Image (cartoon, rainbow, N blue to C red):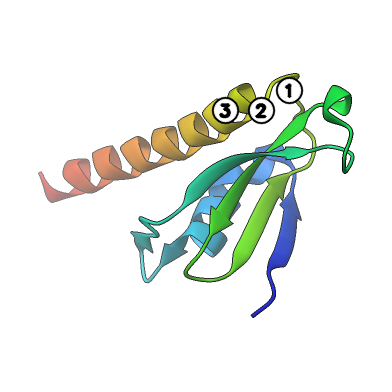
Amino acid sequence: MSLKTFCYPAHQIVAVYDEQLCTNGQPDLGVQYQGRLREWGAPASGYRPALFLPAKQRIVVITDKCFGREINARAWIADQIRLIAIARKRKEEASCA
């Protein structure tokens, strides 16, 4: 099976969470946070935040964010996903009260 690549701007990170990361409202626990080279084979060009979803064989790349180090790109996307998950959890808890 070949990988499909999906590209999104940073302001659509919630859409990435809903459309790509979650299946039936449950996030894919096998997600891998990545930093993808902005230009293939040119580390000096920077890294874009990305998600690899092994269950769906997809890569999601945030095209309008670029970091000088791969670890910073991975940290940014991981933090964004974490913040969305926390906000969703708080919303669920508030509606149940």
Residue at (36%, 64%) from the top-left corner? 25
Label 1 element class? loop
Spatial CA distance of label 3 from label 2 is 10 Å
Residue at mark 2 = 70
User: What's the CA distance linking mark 1 and mark 2?
Assistant: 7 Å
Image quadrant occupied by the C terminus = top left
Where residue 77 appears, x then y in whole percent? 56, 35
Q: Is mark 3 on a helix, strand or loop?
A: helix
N-term mark: 3 or 1: 1
**Depth check, front residue: 48 or 94:** 48
The reply to whether discs 3 and 1 touch (Cβ–Cβ < 8 Å) is yes
Task: Say whether residue 3 is left or right of residue 44.
Answer: left
Q: In this view, does 68 lie to the left or right of 74?
A: right
Above or below residue 27? Residue 80 is above
| Residue 89 shown left or right of residue 80 in the figure | left
Asked if the residues shown at circle 1 and circle 2 are in contact, with their CB atoms under 8 angstroms apart, the answer is yes
Amino acid type assigned to the residue bearing label 2 in the image = Glu
Q: In the image, residue 78 lies at what x, y percent?
A: 49, 35
Q: Quickly name the residue at label 1.
A: 67
Residue picked out by circle 3: 76
Q: Toward which corner of the image does residue 36 lie, by quadrant? A: top right
Extreme residue toward the bottom, this view: 1
| Secondary structure type for disc 2 | helix
